[in-house]
Amino acid sequence: MKITSVEARVLVWPPMTPAFWMSLLPVNRPHELVVLIHTDDGLTGIGHSDQASSIFNVGSDGKPKLASASRIVPDLISPLLVGEDPASVEQLWQKVFGLTYRHHWNREGWSRSSMLSALAAVDMALWDLRGKAAGLPVFRLLGGNEAAVPMYVAGGYYREGKGLAELAAESAQYREHGYKALKMRVGGMSVEEDVERVAVVREAVGPDVKLMLDANEAYDSNTAIKVAPLYEPYGIFWFEEPVAWYEGNDGLKRVAEETGISVAGGEQAATHWEAEAMARDSGISYMEFDCMRTGGPTEWLRVADACRRIGVHMAPHHGAHIHAHLVSAAPNGLMVEAFPDPFMYDSAEQLEFVRWDRKREMFSAHPEVRDGMMCMSEQPGWGIEMDPEVIGKREVLE
Ligand SMILES: [Mg+2]
């Protein structure tokens, strides 16, 4: 089989109104870089990445316009892949990755992180082809046996007008819909207010639901060490990104050593080298490497193997429909992150669900969430199909 062409599509959704917030930053306008790899066998591999920088800008007319990084796939990557056998996933990964340390890679304003995001989508499309050529879903191709993977809900965001009663109602709904683990934000309010929020959520979900805290790097290590014992009585499964970016692995290590809560991190690690160094040096117990933000599934599998050797579990950030395949196959795979189905909820308070809803509309086939589990089909590849009508509606062409 040979690659005959590589297509890139940029999809952008309207801004979310009203906005909702992580601990320090608003959640971005949803967008996707979609890569379609076509072959002479008639098979098409699908990949997409949602974290690339410089993919689009907003023009003075308020409409999205293509930005510099949207040229990476057609101008740089496509010529490297056409004519190659898509089964050579590792070699093709290396070929594309090599762009990040060649001359002139930034000549058009392309950033290294944009190139790694484009690589993520390309590598994902190659794995889709590999599964389709073998007639197997990717998780079975990788030796996975479980078609259903546990999910945790990413909820408990900050939003204007959202009080403790709304937070409690939101949390209770998750439990009613079968989720057995819930993550909420801390670090965006005073410590006293956040401790009260955590207490309210624990009360709402009961003692048996795993409860995780995500500080999105809002504390310095001294503060994280001081606040952790205040959260600890509420049975916290992990404390995610507790420390500001500038303290790096040393700051995480202090928190891991000096508090009683396990630490999670790695959603921003750019490469397997960075993720492995973090797993080795920071004392984290849960690695959240996101193969759709950077590097692709090939890179994720390397991270998972390095983490397996030192007893660190894999709980990847975002992209549950893809990461579920990898978690199913990895011996240290734990769970994937859920943004629940908005149609199950009738309250305007649950605006966080809009994100998954908007993106989900681009698929005419995708894995289903049932009873707190991501359930994969036996469809070869990732089990996703793009809806051409939605691509037509959301695509930015110039
Ligand atoms: Mg996080």
Image (spheres, rainbow, N blue to C red):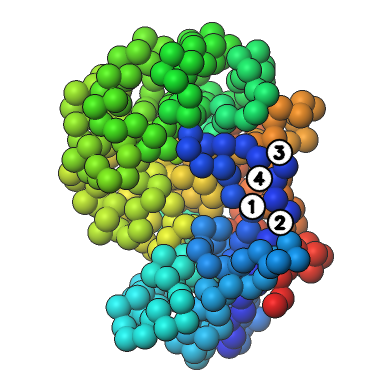
Question: Is disc 2 placed on a helix, strand or loop?
Answer: loop
Gap in Å between the C-alphas at discs 3 and 1? 11 Å
Q: Are marks 2 and 1 in contact (CB under 8 Å)?
A: yes
Q: Residue at x 38, y 56 (%)?
A: 300
| x and y percentages locating residue 10 in the rendered image | 64, 69
Q: Are marks 3 and 1 in contact (CB under 8 Å)?
A: no
Q: Nearer the viewer, mark 3 or mark 2?
A: 3
Q: Nearer the viewer, residue 282 or 384?
A: 282
Residue labelled with disc 4: 355
Residue labelled with disc 3: 18
**N-terminal of the two: label 3 or label 1?**
3
Residue 218 sits above or below residue 297 on the image: above
Residue labelled with disc 1: 29
Residue furthest front as drawn: 60
Q: Residues within 10 Å of mark 4 (few under 14, many from 20)?
A: many
Q: Nearer the viewer, mark 1 or mark 4?
A: 1
Q: Are marks 3 and 2 in contact (CB under 8 Å)?
A: no
Q: Residue at x 39, y 34 (%)?
A: 218
